[in-house]
Amino acid sequence: MFAALSHTFHTPSLGDEEFEIPPITPPPEMESGLGLSEVDSPFPAMPEPPGPHRGPLIPQFPPQSLDLPSITISRNMMDQEGMTVNNGQPVNVGSGHLRQYPPNPAMVMKSIISMNSTNGMIARNQLTTINQSQLNTQNLNMAGPNITHTSPSPPASKSATPSPSSSINEDDQDDGNRVIGEKRPAPIDPTKKPKTPKKKKKKDPNEPQKPVSAYALFFRDTQAAIKGQNPNATFGEVSKIVASMWDGLGEEQKQVYKSKTEAAKKEYLKALAAYRASLVSKAAAESAEAQTIRSVQQTLASTSLSPGLVLSSPLNQHPSMSPASQALQRAIAPKPLQMRLGGNQIVTSVTVSHQNMSGGIPPQLLGQMGSGAVNRSDGMEDSVKSSRRTSERLAIFQRVQTASQTLS
DNA sequence: CAAATGATTGTTTGG
DNA sequence: CCAAACAATCATTTG
């Protein structure tokens, strides 16, 4: 199977490394440049075909672990014991082609893709194996010169990075400096380092989860195949391979993933808006409740029922709003959202908007934000509001009474 | 104020 | 939690 599909790629220049990339499943599309696609559906006009999974043979883009091209990374057999054939996956040594990540993966992929596109070619056993001499630990280090992937400080830097745990709540202290220094040790330029602290915003556990990026999706899909071919490959190695493949991916193909993430992002924004709305409503409810309680307390006090008891209520402490509510308010505050599209374009929009909310929010969420402050103004009628308020007050009043009874 | 850019965060899997 | 690499987001600076 694989052999048929896969295509071997050869880079003459590099002797050491062999990099055979199997065509990740038939390219969803031909490369934009080549018009050859005789393939039935060259362009997935739609980002994603509704169809669940297609047969392995069918050229589908999303690399399924099954179909996925067998990517073998073989290093020098001699040196390594681990990577060798025993992986369970056949490794092509002789046929292996050399490839360097840094150089131009794109070319490789494209060529591979093009090859695949041509049916005839495929017939031949095209085995894509990725062979990297670099994979060797030695090589990895050695490779440095070529790759020089930006790692001023090798391993140490990582630990240095503000580990989430360590940074826990030092936001203020933030040593923005520290962070910066790590990233760019050399540039200690006092001149240009406003050193914007950038406090890390603590994330809400409840906040909707951000959608994964296109690359992450690709990684998820591809990684398994790579691993399959190279069980011994480390995460870093796999990551590099995936990166090179990603790099080689055609725009259209990337678009497939991007559209996925885009959709996910849309959902995310909706969920986020809904979530924030719910927070608002909560805060509003809370403040309303507090107010109600206060008024009730006043009433009680005036009637000289049991003032002392009433005063002890926590809600009473702040005349205006409880700290929690304030925090909520802050969290909810509609912030402009920046999105960087493609190149450098930045789109600015308001995160939370009424339109959005009424638009696609799930019913349950909508229900939650029923008494929300945000929507309250538009949707709810005064009569409803007042009645609700009344009932709330009643309930609270009852609670207070009960409490006072209990305590007394 | 909007655009540009730097910095940080958050993904991926597996140990 | 970390690995490598990337994308997305955020925050600050700049024009």
Image (tube, coloured by chain):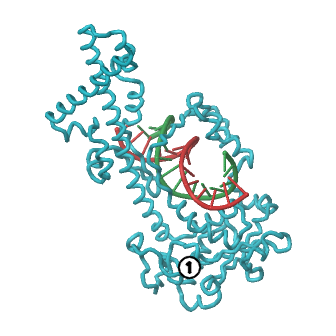
Chain colours: A cyan, B red, C green
Which quadrant is home to the N terminus of chain A? bottom right
Q: Which residue is mark 1?
A: A113
Residue A78 percent across, percent down from the top left: 86, 73
Q: Is residue A197 left or right of residue A279?
A: right
The image shows residue A139, relative to residue A318, as above or below, that is below
Q: Is residue A332 left or right of residue A381?
A: right
The quarter holding residue A233 reads bottom right
The image shows residue A161, relative to residue A75, as above or below, that is above
Residue A76 percent across, percent down from the top left: 81, 73
Q: Is residue A5 left or right of residue A84?
A: left
Chain of the residue under label 1: A
The quarter holding residue A164 reads top right
Residue drawn at the location 50% of the way across and 61% of the way down? A214
Residue A383 percent across, percent down from the top left: 13, 34
Residue drawn at the location 16% of the way across and 36% of the way down? A384
Which quadrant is home to the C terminus of chain A? top left
Q: Nearer the viewer, residue A393 or A4?
A: A393
